Amino acid sequence: MFYEFRQNNSGGRFSHDESQGISVEVVVEATSASEANMLAEEIGLYFHGVEEGWDCPSCGDRWYEADDSDGTSVPTLYGQPVSEQAWEKLYGGRGAIKWIKHGHEGFIHYKDGRVEGFWLDK
């Protein structure tokens, strides 16, 4: 199953690290939500950032934990498969705002260790 983690830009900025596979959108393949949450933390995502004092209390936590009901059989964002077609449908395509100007908008982390970036600013 695949679990989506969408970053909240707490404090008015997004965390982005191409080498770790962290961007606005992070999708993790796992057998359960609890495993996805554990793997997400190993990647560098964190939960309860407001409580820990890392995130802006007015903006909210940067990341939220996945729930078992969130799992999908293919990598998705907002219920749409991750693809160029999804970019067109979700964001209006090439004229849409891209949050990450120099890098991938998101990454998929597979169980086998592969990390694939998607929606690269060209």
Image: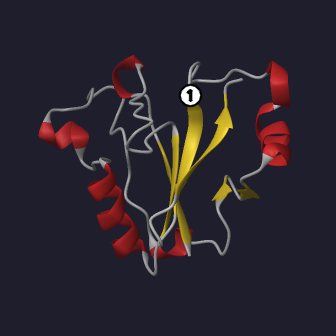
- Horizontal side of residue 86 vs 51, given as left or right: right
**Quadrant of the frame with the N terminus:** bottom right
- Residue 72 to residue 86: above or below: below
- Quarter-of-image position of residue 12: top left
Q: Position of residue 84 (x, y in %)?
A: 81, 44
Identity of the residue drawn at 14% across and 33% down: 53
Q: Which residue is mark 1?
A: 103
Q: Position of residue 26 (x, y in %)?
A: 50, 49
Q: Secondary structure at mark 1?
A: loop
- Horizontal side of residue 52 vs 37, given as left or right: left
- Horizontal side of residue 52 vs 118, given as left or right: left
Judging depth in this view, the residue of 28 and 49 nearest the camera is 28
Judging depth in this view, the residue of 115 and 34 nearest the camera is 115
Q: Position of residue 90 (x, y in %)?
A: 77, 40
- Residue 113 to residue 17: above or below: below
> Colour scheme used in the picture?
secondary structure
